[in-house]
Amino acid sequence: MSEAKPVILTCAQPTGGGDLTLGNYIGAVRNWATMQEDYECYFGIVDMHAITVRREPAELRKACYSCLAQYIACGLDPEKAALFFQSHVIGHAELAWVLSCYTPIGDLQRMTQFKEKAEKLGFQVKSAGDDIRFSHEGAKAQASVNSGLLYYPVLMAADILLYNANAVPVGEDQRQHLELTRDLAQRFNNTYSPTFNIPNAYIPKSGAKVMSLQEPTRKMSKSDENPNGTLFLIEPPEKLAKKIKSAVTDSGSEIRVADDKPGVSNLITILSVLTGKSVQEIEKDYQGQNYATFKGDVAEAVVETLRPVQARYHEIISDKVYLEGVLKDGAARAQNRAYKVLNKVYRKVGFPDRVR
Ligand code: TYM
């Protein structure tokens, strides 16, 4: 009998119109595509996470499908991997509830992403242990911080542990969430008996944090207020090239990686990952060259890498029958594994067996 393959689970949010960024591609989806032979793969689109901010229902539905088509266009293969929407699989919310009962509230209040998101809503978050205080920054405070925002990492831990994943390929920004997941798995195992694998974060050596083109000390993000800082996978090539050519560069004219050159360093990383050339080779190639030539080459590399991705996306995005077939199959495979783990957890915590 052949040995079972290790399991990976990973997900992305259908933020905005569901458009993935070059950061998502380089730090995440591109790498997932290379793992499909060696791992049993579950790739989710986390619509339940997406409602921590208000969304227009029809737009969210559309964003989920767009994100699915982009997954496939980037090389995720529905024949090899289970591709699914989080809300289609029973167990994510159920396991999140169980895990929340093992999660000290202080652990959630300390999460960097929670603080950042609350601050974006105009709150200042000060936490000391289990005590949390929000103070309004005057008129900037727009809404209350909903508890889903605080609870977000528990749902994410449930996403991972529901499949008893061995590894989770993600970008650098998810490291802290993975640490919490590992702590929760350990805590549960220690309280009962070994139940969950302790999942490893699988973070690429290069490109794990692609930065904004306009503010290169911040990560490239789907929800950036400045759209010129973010490259979207399905943007028209002219627009991609224009954004790259107007990327913020640094003082001086040398093309090399350095702490005081975050803009140029970011572009070098992008070029290195997309061409397979090392940073040293790139620095050597561009000795004595100007920024305009260099940016032109980065733009070409991005546009040419994304050309086949965009072509495939446009082929499948209107094929609802095909996409629904992918989802039906993906959800069935995911559900099959999820039920097994959920049942095991329910038994361990002492819920009575269902009477049939
Ligand atoms: P999300 O949707 O923000 O991002 C999806 C994946 O893309 C990576 N990523 C980046 N990598 C490099 N540079 C960037 N600028 C960049 N921006 C994003 C992210 O690290 C991620 O791997 N909380 C998660 C979604 C999630 C999840 C999960 C992930 C929910 N449940 C379970 C893994 C496992 C998120 O918001 O990712």
Image (spheres, rainbow, N blue to C red):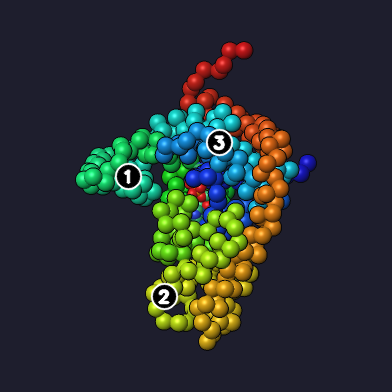
Q: Tell me residue 10's x, y (percent).
A: 57, 46
Depth check, front residue: 353 or 74:
74
Q: Tell me residue 201's x, y (percent).
A: 52, 52
What residue occupies the far front of the structure in this picture? 238
Q: Give the quarter of the figure containing the N terminus.
A: top right
Label 3, on which residue?
Answer: 61
Q: Tell me residue 129's x, y (percent).
A: 27, 43
Determine whether the residue tagged by mark 2 lies in a helix, strand or loop. loop
Q: Give the quarter of the figure containing the C terminus.
A: top right
Label 1, on which residue?
Answer: 121
Is residue 78 visible in this depiction of the protein?
A: yes
Q: Earlier in the sequence, mark 2 or mark 1?
A: 1
Depth check, front residue: 333 or 22:
22
Q: Earlier in the sequence, mark 2 or mark 3?
A: 3
What residue occupies the far right of the structure in this picture? 1
215 relative position to 124: left or right:
right
Q: Amino acid at mark 2?
A: Asp
Q: Tell me residue 171's x, y (percent).
A: 51, 55
